[in-house]
């Protein structure tokens, strides 16, 4: 009797329906397994370390007005058909108020520094720290960043170059082009 009932259910349920049911059961089992593993091995959320930057309120207000006057996009301190060319005063003002270096400028600067490029690629494109400073003795904007190996090595590479181009996002400016020394 039981054998006859099984044969009858095989006739009623098609082969495709059984396979689809098995697939859904497998998917739900995998999801349930990962939920259990996630609750057991849950890590705390990582928050990025933010460097504190002390900027005077007057300087920020002046800078905001200054940024809104400039066109959005590339701001260059060299002659170019692509982007807006900065005067010396604009270049100095933007340099003193820029705190961010774009990924594009870091990758471009790494092309000429082979050791930095190798370490940058090996450590998963991580930057340890960066800074943008105005050098009043030479009247240039210096962009500096340090690439550090993640684990198992103490090797670090520091790249210093002149920030020759910036990117105006409308809210802030970022270093867009670094000329290595």
Image: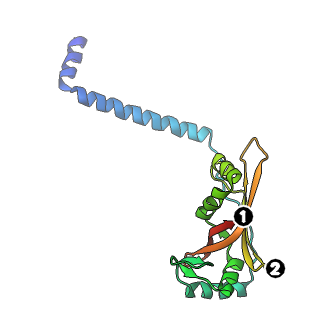
Label 2, on which residue? 137
> Percent from the top left, x then y, of residue 28?
42, 36
> Secondary structure under badge 1?
strand
Residue drawn at the location 58% of the way across and 79% of the way down: 79
> Percent from the top left, x then y, of residue 130?
72, 64
Which quadrant is the N terminus positioned in? top left
Which quadrant is the C terminus positioned in? bottom right
Near-viewer residue (156 or 6): 156
Q: Is residue 70 above or below residue 169?
A: below
How many callouts does the rendering have? 2
- Residue furthest right in the image: 137
Q: Mark 1 Cα within 10 Å, few/some/many (few <14, many 20+)?
A: some
**Coloured how?**
rainbow
Label 1, on which residue? 130
**Within the image, what quadrant is residue 52 found in?**
bottom right
Please indicate whether residue 5 sits to the left or right of residue 132 in the image. left
> Secondary structure under badge 2?
loop
Q: Is residue 129 above or below residue 62?
A: above
> Percent from the top left, x then y, of residue 112?
66, 58
Near-viewer residue (16 or 95): 95
Residue drawn at the location 61% of the way across and 74% of the way down: 166
């Amino acid at each position: 009797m039981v054998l006859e009932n099984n044969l009858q259910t095989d006739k009623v349920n098609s082969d495709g329906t059984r396979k689809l049911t098995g697939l859904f059961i497998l998917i739900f089992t995998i999801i349930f397994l990962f939920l259990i593993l996630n609750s057991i091995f849950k890590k705390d959320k990582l928050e990025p370390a933010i460097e504190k930057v002390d900027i005077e309120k007057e300087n920020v207000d002046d800078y905001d007005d200054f940024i809104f006057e400039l066109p959005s996009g590339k701001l260059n301190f060299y002659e170019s058909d692509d982007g807006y060319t900065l005067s010396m005063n604009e270049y100095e003002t933007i340099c003193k108020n820029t705190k961010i270096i774009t990924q594009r400028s870091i990758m471009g600067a790494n092309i000429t520094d082979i050791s930095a490029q190798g370490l940058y690629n090996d450590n998963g494109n991580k930057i340890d720290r960066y800074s943008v400073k105005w050098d009043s003795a030479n009247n240039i904007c210096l962009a500096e960043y340090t690439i550090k190996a993640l684990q198992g090595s103490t090797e670090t590479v520091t790249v210093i170059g002149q920030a020759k181009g910036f990117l105006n996002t409308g809210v802030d400016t970022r270093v867009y082009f670094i000329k290595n020394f």
